[in-house]
Image: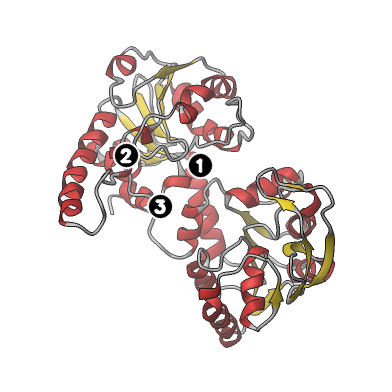
Amino acid sequence: MTIDQFNFAGKKAIVRVDFNVPLDENGNVTDKTRIMGALPTLKKVLADGGAVIMMSHMGKPKGKVNPKMSLSQIVKPVSEALGVEVKFAPDCANATAEAEALKPGEALLLENLRFYPEEEGKPVGVEKGTPEYDEAKKAMKKSQKEFAKKLASYADAYVMDAFGTAHRKHASTAVIDEFFDADHRMLGYLMEKEVQAVDNVLSNIKRPFVAIMGGSKVSSKIGIIENLLGKVDKLILCGGMTYTFAKAHDGEIGDSIVELDKLDVALGVEELAKKNGVELVLGSDCNATNGLDFGTMSLKPGAEIITCPANKVPAGFEGVDAGPASQEDFRNAIKGAKTILWNGPAGVFECDAFTAGSRAIGEAIAEATAEGAFSLIGGGDSVACVNKFGLADKVSYISTGGGALLEAIEGKVLPGVAAIKGE
């Protein structure tokens, strides 16, 4: 069943959205990308004459109520975006009365699903690997099913539209579907677009295919890097992982972030790239500093900024952005690409002094897109980059999922998609 085929008239639809949005210290939403992304699906339900029940998580409350992660804080911005006054249910597991009171055209937002440990299905307060844990896991699995059944009881139809959590086998993403017939469960518009975008990158490749992988750790990206090395023509590796590669060749990296236990992994990536005929582009130089305050993402008084080879960072300094030569290498590698994937920044872009590397990548992608390339941007940091640089409307598709996008591109089956399809 597709959402376009289904008529929600007179029905209540429970929609798994991803409203895990960033908030400032006053509880104000600082980036509404995920809220805006959910609107087409929510508006379809309302336009048909149905009522919509939204459920989501926020943050990692670990099964406990935490006011700082309450979805009550986003009722107003969701109402404004949807154009309907959104009602709020302060307890997602006991919202029968609120759900029953909903009339066609009305909307309800449930409280944070992760205030209940049953959502994630992880035993609480029991040490992993013990006999007690195994018993607790069995009990939790049963409780998770009951929790999902309760959520399902609020509605006539279920819509999965949270790509950012599609890789998790949680109650609201991959268990709740059991309580709806195949013709009453479906993917939302956002999910359909996300799945199609991944398919465009992996199954409908137009060459040259260039992937840019950034971020601090090789270990968190090794699966996708190895998978991409069998598909791409060029692979740009940037960000903090640059220094693990430099160290693997006995480079001097000062105080730069490094995974000393992954030096062999870095060398293995280089070998696999060579074997597959993939052009591997690593930053040759970097902008480094001896005074970045990571807490405030600002420079400390008297801090110095230097440009140096990525394998010759002086003691006391750490590489925090791609240097001018690296930026030019990245631009040249992206130029002429027909398929582009970007996940992870080239530096600490949150600090305005170190945006140059990520900006160079973003602008080069925008130029290639204008010349006909399909560009997919995914992962929270990369999305924040294109938004910060005003490039969001100059790329083909911005994914709302980080881990889900990586697992999909890695070739893994996403439980949130498989459940809808009954696989």
**Marks 2 and 1: in contact by CB < 8 Å?**
no
Residue labelled with disc 2: 119
Residue labelled with disc 1: 190
Q: Where on the picture, by quarter, is residue 24?
A: top right
Per the model, the C-alpha gap separating discs 1 and 2 is 22 Å
Mark 1: secondary structure: helix
Residue at the spot x=29%, y=14% of the render?
97
Residue at the spot x=55%, y=23% of the render?
82
Residue labelled with disc 3: 167
Q: Nearer the viewer, residue 354 or 372?
A: 354
Per the model, the C-alpha gap separating discs 3 and 1 is 15 Å
Query: Would you say 289 lies left or right of 262 here?
Result: right
Q: Is residue 236 something one can see in this rendering?
A: no
Which numbered mark, 2 or 3, is in the foreground of this view?
Answer: 2
Q: Where on the picture, by quarter, is residue 89?
A: top left
Per the model, the C-alpha gap separating discs 2 and 3 is 14 Å
Q: Residues within 10 Å of mark 1 (few under 14, many from 20)?
A: many
**Marks 1 and 3: in contact by CB < 8 Å?**
no
Which part of the image, by quadrant, shows the N terminus?
top left
Image location (x, y in percent) of residue 375: 65, 57
Image location (x, y in percent) of residue 181: 24, 38
Number of marks: 3
